[in-house]
Amino acid sequence: MHPEPIFDLAHLGHMELLTPKPDESLKFFVDVMGMTISGRKGESVYLRGWDDYERYSLKLTASKTSGMEHMALRARSPQALERRVAALKGSGYDIGWIDGDMGQGPTFRCRDPDGHIVELYYETEWYEAPPELKPALKIRRSGFPRAASTSAGSIISIVSRSISKPTASSLKIISAAG
């Protein structure tokens, strides 16, 4: 008989990267990768991807060396977190409970067999978009910048009018827009 699968971990929550080049790293993740800043605390900047539902998914921290400080895994429930903590306690991998970081509740730290720090948590702060980025769809955490939404809305309006009443002028508008 096979052991029952463990479904206690929901997903990778975030990662903290250490960087001796904090300004360059921040520009890379914002200007090249397209992430947005969702907070700052001490020597750290918190970043999120466009549709992340949590407050952040990457924490950049200024440091003398580069590397991963830790990765965090979100449990699927408070009970799931307790089960994973119980499995870790006394295993030689456990470190213990800490207060959670920005936007995160109580967190249990451990090390993997390679010595990497892994955090387990459940409580999280959901990202709230500022008014200019509120999404039209409630399933999204962020909307597109307003200028893009207006342009897309205009094109949809033009296309829908042209479908119901195709004319030579509406076809010119569609070909100019697309």
Image (tube, rainbow, N blue to C red):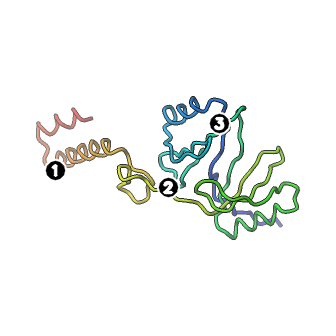
Indicate the position of residue 7 as horizontal and vertical percent values.
69, 63
Label 1 packing within 10 angstroms: few (<14), some (14-19), many (20+) = few
Q: Which of the marked residues, 1 or 3, is nearer the chain's N terminus? A: 3
Q: As rendered, which of 68 and 50 lies closer to the eye?
A: 68
Q: Which of the marked residues, 3 or 2, is nearer the chain's N terminus? A: 3
Q: Nearer the viewer, mark 1 or mark 2?
A: 2
Q: As rendered, which of 177 and 80 lies closer to the eye?
A: 80
Rendering quarter of residue 81? bottom right
* Mark 1: amino acid: Ser
* Residue 120: mark: none
* Residue 62: mark: 3
Outermost residue on the bottom side: it is 79
Label 3 – label 2 distance at C-alpha: 24 Å
At mark 3, the secondary structure is strand
Image vertical order of residue 81 relative to residue 175, above or below: below
* Mark 3: amino acid: Ala
Indicate the position of residue 46 as horizontal and vertical percent values.
56, 45
Q: Where's the N terminus, which quadrant? A: bottom right
Residue at horizontal 27 percent and vertical 45 percent from the top? 150
Mark 1 = which residue? Answer: 164
Outermost residue on the front side: it is 42
How many callouts does the rendering have? 3
Label 3 packing within 10 angstroms: few (<14), some (14-19), many (20+) = some
Indicate the position of residue 41 as horizontal and vertical percent values.
59, 46
